[in-house]
Every structure is written in C-alpha cells, then in structure tokens.
Image: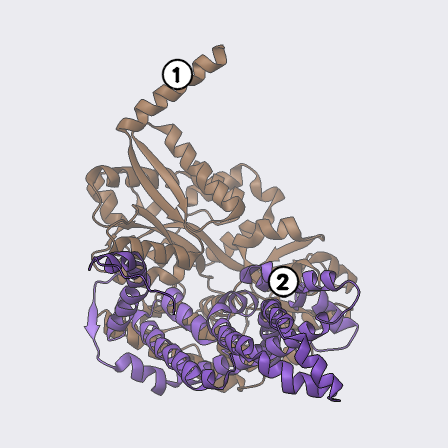
Amino acid sequence: MAKQYEFKARFLPYLLVIPQMVIVFVFFFWPSAQGLWQSFFLQDPFGGTMIFVGLENYLRLFTDASYAYGESFIISTSFALTVTAFAMTTALFLAVQANRKIRFATFYKTMLIWPYAVATMVAGVLWLFMFNPNVGVIAWALKTKFGVDWQYLINSGQAFFLVTIAASWKQISYNFVFFLAGLQSVPKDFIEAAAIDGASPTKRFWKIIFPLLSPTTFYLLVMNLVYAFFETFPIIHQVTSGGPGKSTSILVYKIWRDGVVNLDLGGSSAQSVILMILVVGLTVLQFRFLERRVNY
Amino acid sequence: MKKILSLTIALALSATAAFAQVQVEFWHAMTGKNADNVQALADKFNTSQTAYKVVPVYKGSYSDTMNAGIAAFRAKQAPAIIQVYEVGTATMMSAKGAIKPVYQLMKETGEKFDPKAYIPTITSYYSTSKGDMLSLPFNSSTAVMYYNKDAFKKAGLDAEKPPVTWPEFFTIAKKLKASGMEGGFSTNWISWIQLENFAAWHNQAFGTKNNGFDGLDTKLVFNTPLTLKHFQTIYDLSKDKVFIYGGRENKANPLFTSGQVGMHFESIGGYANMKANCKFDFGVARIPYYSDVKGAPQNTIIGGASLWVFNGKSKEEYKAVAAYFAFLSLPESQAFWHQNTGYLPITTAAYELTKKQGFYDTNPGPEVAIKQLLNKAPTGNSMGIRFGNFNIIREIEDQTWEDILAGKIAVKAGLEKMVKDGNAKLREFERLNK
C-alpha cells in the first residue's frame, strides 16, 4: 500500500475546491434555480408583470395540443437514438477497417478524423448548401439526374433524414478516434490464440474484441446521446429551423424558440426544468445499470 | 509633417468635443450594406453638430437585438435607442414603464416635430389609435411582386404587362411553367404577404378590433371564403409544381434569382438584393387582387422595424435622441436612406425630393411600392396589425402552411387551425397585459 499524505489544515481542502464550486454555482446551480423559479410564473419579457400560476406552465405543455410538447419529445428521442446508432455503428465499422494492415492507413485515418474539426454551425451550413432544394448542388442532382422529388422543406421524412445524417457525420469522426484507440489496446495475444483455436474473424470480433471494447462503447453511448440531445441545435437551426411544420423541432431547439424568439419565458423555463430532470435521470440510469455490464 | 500636425489638431479637437458631448447608443439589427448606411447616417448627424454623438451598435438578428434590449433593461443597462421589428410592436407598447413614447419625447424636449409630415400608412403602424406616435418608423417596406421580364418574353407574354388580378396571375404562372421553367411562382413570408397584406389589400379584417389597434381582446378572423379560395388555388398549383415553396421568411429568394420561377413575392426592402443577384431583366409590380371583392385594391401594409426609446434616461440623453430623430426625419436623410437601401421614405417630403432627383427614372421598383402603399387612405383593415405574441402567431401560420402543402391537413382545416391556435396566443397575451 502506498502511503497516503494527509493535510493537517482543516480549511485548505475547502479553499482548494472553492474555485470549482464557484464555477459550478454560477454556471449551473444559479441558472437552474432561476429556471425553476421562472417556470412557476407567467411574465412579460420586461419583467413588469409576474403572475404566479403554480404548475400551469407544466400542465400547458402536456394538455395544450398547439404546444406539441409530446410530439417534440418523441422527435427528440427518435432523433437522438437514430443519430447515436448510426454514428456509432458506422464509426465502429470504419475503425475496424482502418485498424487492419492496409496501405495508406494513416491517410484514411486522417481523412476520417477531419470532420470533427468542423464547428457544428459550419457543418449545418455545409449540409444546407448541398441539400437545399433552392440552391443545393446535390439537391439539384437528386432532382434532375435521379428523379427524386427532393423537397425537404415540405417533406418531413426527408427533413428528418437530412438532419440525422448531418448530425451523425461530425460525430462519426469523434467515435472513430475512440474506437480506433480502443481496438489498438486489445491485446494481440488473445486474438492470435483464438485464431489458432479456429475461431472465425466474425467470432473473434464478437467474442473477444467487442466485449473488450465495452468501456469505450459505453463512454461513447453516453457522449453520443448527450450530443444528439443537446449539441445538435446549430444543425437544426441552420438546416430546417424545426420545420417543415414542427417535424424536426427537437426539445433544445423548442426551448430556445419559445423562450428567446417568442418570449414565452414561463413555458420555456418549464421545458428546461423537464429536460434537466430527464438528463439527470438518464445519467443515473446509465451509470447504475449499464456500467455494471461493462468489463473494465 | 503638415499633415501630421493638422491630424493632431483634429484629434485634439475631437477629443475635447467628445468630452462635453452627450453620447447615446443605438442598438440595431442591420447587416451588410444596410449596416453601413446606418453608420453613414449616424456619421452625418455626428458631424453636423457637436453637442451629441449617436453610436450605432449591431446586436444580431431582430430577435437577438430585442432580447439584448430586454436583458439590458432588466439589468438597468438599456441603450437609449433600440430598433425593434414590427412583430414586436405590441410587446414594446405593453412594456409598462420601459418605454418613452416618441410623441412625448418630442414634446418634452421641445424638438420640432410635425406628425402630419409623415406618411400615415407608415406611422399608423406605430401609433396609438388616437394617432400619437410611439416609435419612429425606421426601415419600412411593403410587399410587391417581382417578375422575370426575359421569362415573360420567352413564354410569349407581354413583359410590360404584369398580371393585375389573381386569376390573370395564375394563368400566367401556368404559361411560364409550360414554357419550360421549373415552376411558375413562389413567395416569401406566407404570413406577412399572403395573409396580412392579402387581407389589407382587399380591405378585409385580419383580426377584430381594427386588427388589434383598439384592444387586446382582438381575435383572428382571416379564415374567410376569400382566403380559402386563394390558399386552395395555391395548394392545387403546388401539386403541378406551378407554385414552388421555398421556405420560411425570405428563404425563397434564390428560386427567383436563379430563374427557376418567373414570378415572386418579396419585400421592396429586398430590391437592392434583387438588382445585385438577378442576371436577367426583372420588373416590379403591384400585388394582384381579386376584382370581385368590393373595395379592392385598398392599400398594402408595411413591414420592417421602428426605433423605440427606453425610459429612465437623463434629460440630456433625451435631447440627443430627439435631435437625432428630427435629423432622421429630414427629407435629405430619408431620401439618402430610401435610395441606398430600398426601404421606403417615411415622409412625403422625402418622396417628393427623391422624385425630383430623378431616382425613379432608373429605379422604378420602389415607386411602385410607395404608390401601392398610398393607393387609398388606410381603413381600419389596412392601418397595420397590432398583436401580442405576434411572432409565434406567424410561426403557427408558417408551420400549418407547411403541413397543408405536405397534405397532412386540408386547406380549410388548416386555416381554421391557424386562427384557433393563434387566438389562444392572443388570449395568453391579453391575460398578461390586462
């Protein structure tokens, strides 16, 4: 056992954590408390009138059909799951391919990592310029060369497809880096031993490599879900503005739209409180149940 | 050497001048060339006198700017002047204690101010129903029709005879499509152009209580047989790709500028942009109307933004703001703004001046817009729209229109949904601002 050092001063530990606590307080607890407080009021944006309405802002979300909160909930969830599944499987496939002894491996790796350097906002603009039915090059090709009725400004299925691809594209690079690192740390002996015992490449992958990758996979699952739920805002904002109709209006986008653009502070606060509870719940669930199945 | 000396003197002079100067901030949302024009106007004002200095500050999009203003007001750091888009008008009006009405500001500071000098269709949008001006119109526009003259010729149509009525318009649109174009027509701003302006142009009510001017208990009433006929026709034409939807706000512009459609509805504020981007000869015409509607065409309404003054500033600051507003209202300032941006002049004198300078001989487009705006004296249906939660009401209209085009909801049911959901938002605003 290594000897542990002990500080004798009673206040030093507190002093050392204070900077971190101040940051957490200012950027997390304070705004959260404000959001919670404001979710119980109807207020005019200038703060002149504040009417206490209890839980009305919350009830409004679930009872008022024009709010379409449930709809947004389903959209967000399916969006997050699709993006996560697509980005992770593609990245794993690419990482396995790049991990082999092939020519130009470094070149491929560099190219695959590159998209991660693109800011999400810029990625949104890129996809917009390619696929916008009015000006997009690929949209034009789809329409004239392939006879596809490409009109994502009206067709909600196409809009959902486009934002999913755009959001995944960037994330694939991120996942790729982690999977590749994970694959390289799988001991060669295990694989060789299995090969000698006559295990097929598929079997070797599923029985040895994949289980050994599970810490990476678990980490990426959490990161991807968080990314798809919260950080895809710029892509939605650039590419579809939540449309057509409300078909790509995910929760974070809706909170911004209702609060910042439409100045419904109470309703927007209630939405953020629900989202906060959701995130806390999701994180707890993931760590309690999923982490147990992970082999470190 | 001489140059350096004179420069030093100039700097020293301006430094001392700045010392005694009253500075006021002007937060705005203008970008690109229009931002340069905002700065140019401020520079002109600042060099025309030494007592005051106006500092324009760009704050992002319209909603960003308004939000910045709200946040600043709540933190007691508000600028003196803020530019707010027309949909924010009712919100600003109801902001108790946050706003200093322009007519009051001018009276208190004793600045020369003649409400009759302004064009009524423009100022009425930002005035009480008694005619007291609350904010100063700044960049005002109205919706017009742009048409591709080359495409007209190619389709065997008379390029100097744009359609006057909607039935003529639809016939021409089909002919343009038949001549080999991707589509016949498109439109920006479905809510502002095809609902709000459509109602005003036909002298029909968009909402009760004179479109909300006479009370917060206003209700949307635009789901008339006329609107239904209009929207049903456009929807039917979208099936044959005679109408092409290009997105919300002004996102449909590329359809016209790239020559995919031959006719397009857009603000006259976009005139400079059209001139820069169209590689073909285009014309500007009035919005068509249904000739069987009594009183049509009436006049169209404006869009754009106005300047609001925040409350709680010092007497000197208010004097500076009043002097700047008087400067902005000068025919020369307005003519400069109008001719450089495409936005409309706010005084009749500026219009006359521009005419005298021969601007319209080479730029006929803006005059079409002014004449359309001045077509008749405004009625209760065509003074403007004053709704709280207006932005979200427009959003509901946009969303529902997209659902109609996708075939998710019938045209009639869609219009009813717009009215019903919009009314709920009006009630929320009424409850908050009683």
Q: Which chain's colour is purple?
A: A
Q: Classify 10 Å Cα crowding around label 1: few (below 14), some (14-19), many (20 and above).
A: few
* x then y, percent, for residue B203: 44, 69
In the image, which disc is placed on residue B9? 1
Horizontally, residue A222 falls left or right of residue A61, namely right
- Residue A88 pos. (x, y %): 60, 77
Residue B163 showing in the rendered view: no
Q: What residue type is labelled 1?
A: Ile
In the depicted structure, whether residue A233 falls above or below residue B372: below
Q: Is mark 1 on a helix, strand or loop?
A: helix
Query: As rendered, which of A99 and B30 lies closer to the eye?
Result: A99
- Which residue is at a point 64% across and 73% down the rendered structure image? A183
At label 2, the amino acid type is: Pro
Q: Mark 2 points at which residue?
A: A115
- Between A44 and A23, the one lying in front of the other is A23
Q: Mark 2 belongs to which subunit?
A: A
Specify few, some or many for label 2: CA neighbours under 10 Å numbering under 14, 14-19, or 20 or more: some
Q: Where residue A286 appears, x then y in whole percent?
A: 44, 82
**Chain B, chosen colour in render:** brown
